[in-house]
């Protein structure tokens, strides 16, 4: 049974209503009657995690919100209005998405360039975001490996996305290509950015520990045709350090989600 969403007095930041996705003219569906409601928490933002079996359409959901794909049917609302290109939303992918022939500063400022913001203003605003993501001193380097590490390249992508829209950040397995140590550092970095900027972050991951460590709310998608099958509210402290992973409640949450994931996968 799909999760039912209750609209409260909080303003809606993202709403997906009855979205379905078919690639064969309706003979079969990857996503069907999919609903998701994310409300805006003032002065905090939210950290939403999407889990689910491979091929269930997790990335497709992010692409709907980013405006990179339209559902076969259904509606996508951002801030209570139909999704439009006037309100661009950045998306961070697993693959490095920076332009290697451009500097870090040029990459971060690129979205503002497309909006015809003056060079002086976009560079000033880009430098502010570069400082927030901890890349000050690297702004003149070309955004290419190995001049920058994998973690630094993902920081460039995060900075670019937040500069375009600092209210919503979409992330599709952004740390999947990183080694374990770098991935752990990037998780802590992302918590720090979230607390500083307070966006609503929607993150797709396959890592249950990462989901519990970062998330406010975790949604588990069913196998295709997909919908939201489970919702877990993560009742851990707002500010989290690595010590929370040693908390027995953290371990219990991981086991609970693991059980729900196995139930969804075998259904």
Image (cartoon, helix red, strand yellow):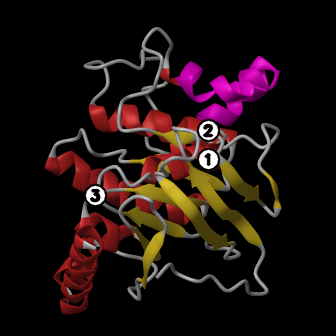
Q: Nearer the viewer, mark 3 or mark 1?
A: 1
Residue 172 seen from this side: yes
Q: Which residue is mark 2?
A: 69
**Which residue: 40% across, 58% down?**
224
**Snapshot quadrant of residue 76:** bottom right
Residue 171: x %, y % from top left: 46, 48
Magenta span = 105-127
User: Could you tell me how far apart the alpha carbons at marks 2 and 1 are, in whole angstroms?
Assistant: 5 Å
Kindly identify which numbered label has been placed on residue 206.
3
Q: Nearer the viewer, mark 3 or mark 2?
A: 2
Residue 45 seen from this side: no
The residue lying toward the viewer, choosing from 172 and 238, is 172
Kindly identify which numbered label has been placed on residue 64.
1
Q: Is residue 59 left or right of residue 177?
A: right
Dots 2, 1 in contact, CB < 8 A: yes
204 up-or-down from 113: above or below: below
Mark 1 crowdedness (10 Å alpha carbons): few <14, some 14-19, many ≥20: some
């Amino acid at each position: 049974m799909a999760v039912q969403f209750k609209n409260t007095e909080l303003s809606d930041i993202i709403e997906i209503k009855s979205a379905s996705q078919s690639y064969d003219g309706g003979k079969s569906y990857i996503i069907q009657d999919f609903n998701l409601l994310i409300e805006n928490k003032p002065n905090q933002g939210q950290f939403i995690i999407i889990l689910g079996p491979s091929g269930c359409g997790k990335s497709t959901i992010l692409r709907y919100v980013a405006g990179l794909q339209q559902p076969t049917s259904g509606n996508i609302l951002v801030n209570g209005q139909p999704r439009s290109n006037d309100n661009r939303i950045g998306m961070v992918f697993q693959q490095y998405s920076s332009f290697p022939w451009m500097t870090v500063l040029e990459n971060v400022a690129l979205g503002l360039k497309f909006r015809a913001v003056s060079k002086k203003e976009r560079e000033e605003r880009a430098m502010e975001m570069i400082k927030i993501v901890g890349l000050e001193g690297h702004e003149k380097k070309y955004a290419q490996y190995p001049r920058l590490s994998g973690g630094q390249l993902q920081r460039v992508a995060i900075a670019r996305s937040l500069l375009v829209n600092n209210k919503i950040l979409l992330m599709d397995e952004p740390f999947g290509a990183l080694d374990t140590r770098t991935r752990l550092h990037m998780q802590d970095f992302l918590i720090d950015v979230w607390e500083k900027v307070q966006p609503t972050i929607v993150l797709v991951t396959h890592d249950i520990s990462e989901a519990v460590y970062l998330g406010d709310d975790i949604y588990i998608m069913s196998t295709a045709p997909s919908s939201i099958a489970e919702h877990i509210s993560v009742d851990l402290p707002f500010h989290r350090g690595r010590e929370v992973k040693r908390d027995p409640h953290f371990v219990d949450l991981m086991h609970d989600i693991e059980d729900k994931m196995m139930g969804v996968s075998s259904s």
